[in-house]
Image (tube, rainbow, N blue to C red):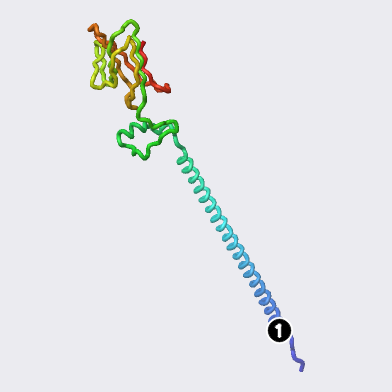
Amino acid sequence: MMMNYYPYMKCIFISILFLSLVACGGGGGDDSSSSDDTSSSTTASSASTTGDSIADDSTTDDSTTDDSTTDDSTTDDSTVDDSTVPKVDQQELLASGTIPLEDLVVGADNTLSSEYSLFVGIQLGDIRRAYVSICEKFNAIDSGYRVDYDSCVLRGPLNEGVFASDVLLGSAQRKLIVAIWLYDGSRPIYYVWNYDDNADSQSLMIN
């Protein structure tokens, strides 16, 4: 009796074919997974690089803003208008007590003298006899001057129509009046003298 092996061989062939298909399908699944992992890694790396780039740009912008702010503030602080600075008189401040004596600034050409000498020379020509009074305090009035003769710094008679003398004055005495009294009883002749800032020496001359 002859056995029929055909059904057995058919089953073996189908089994081998099924195993082959399963093996191929499993390999394909591994490759796809590997590909997905690689893609995810690439995407994450790109995102990280982009984040670092954004952070660098932000740092650069902040630095630029700070430098710009510093430059503006420096420019504002260094701008000074000299014309707005008030000029003061040191002598006035010293007299009022606003500035201490030790803070007084003295120029190299200032001799710090509190006195000066005034030469007085009067020559009246035909008027032979008269009396001279040189005073500090006076006021102008309609008829001439009102003189405080208690403030006189120099007095004396003319000698043959001439009067010459030196008088030492304080630095604050910068304006004087000369009253020449005639012996005929007429009103005195007045002359006003002012200190000359441009002169090396001070003189009062009447001719």
Count of marks, rendered view? 1
The x, y position of residue 126, in whole percent, is 33, 5
**In this view, 40 is above or below 191:** below
Q: Amino acid at mark 1?
A: Ile
How packed mark 1 is, by other alpha carbons closer than 10 Å (few <14, some 14-19, many 20 or more), is few
| Residue 108 as seen in the image, left or right of residue 13 | left
| Residue 182 as seen in the image, left or right of residue 24 | left
Instruction: Work out whether residue 141 or residue 131 is closer to the camera in this orientation and state it.
Output: 131
Instruction: Work out whether residue 133 or residue 142 is closer to the camera in this orientation and state it.
Output: 133
**In this view, 110 is above or below 199:** below
Residue under the image location 67 percent in, 74 percent down = 27
The x, y position of residue 49, in whole percent, is 59, 59
The x, y position of residue 183, in whole percent, is 24, 8
Residue under the image location 71 percent in, 86 percent down = 8
* Quarter of the image with the C terminus in it: top left
Residue beneath disc 1: 12
Residue under the image location 28 percent in, 14 percent down = 157
Q: Quadrant location of residue 130?
A: top left
Q: Which residue, as the protein is rendered here, is positioned at the far right?
A: 2
Q: Which residue, as the protein is rendered here, is positioned at the far top?
A: 126
**In this view, 205 is above or below 35:** above
The x, y position of residue 111, in whole percent, is 41, 31
Q: Secondary structure at mark 1?
A: helix
Q: Which residue, as the protein is rendered here, is positioned at the far front?
A: 160
Instruction: Work out whether residue 145 or residue 15 is closer to the camera in this orientation and state it.
Output: 145
Residue under the image location 26 percent in, 15 percent down = 140
Q: Quadrant location of residue 13?
A: bottom right
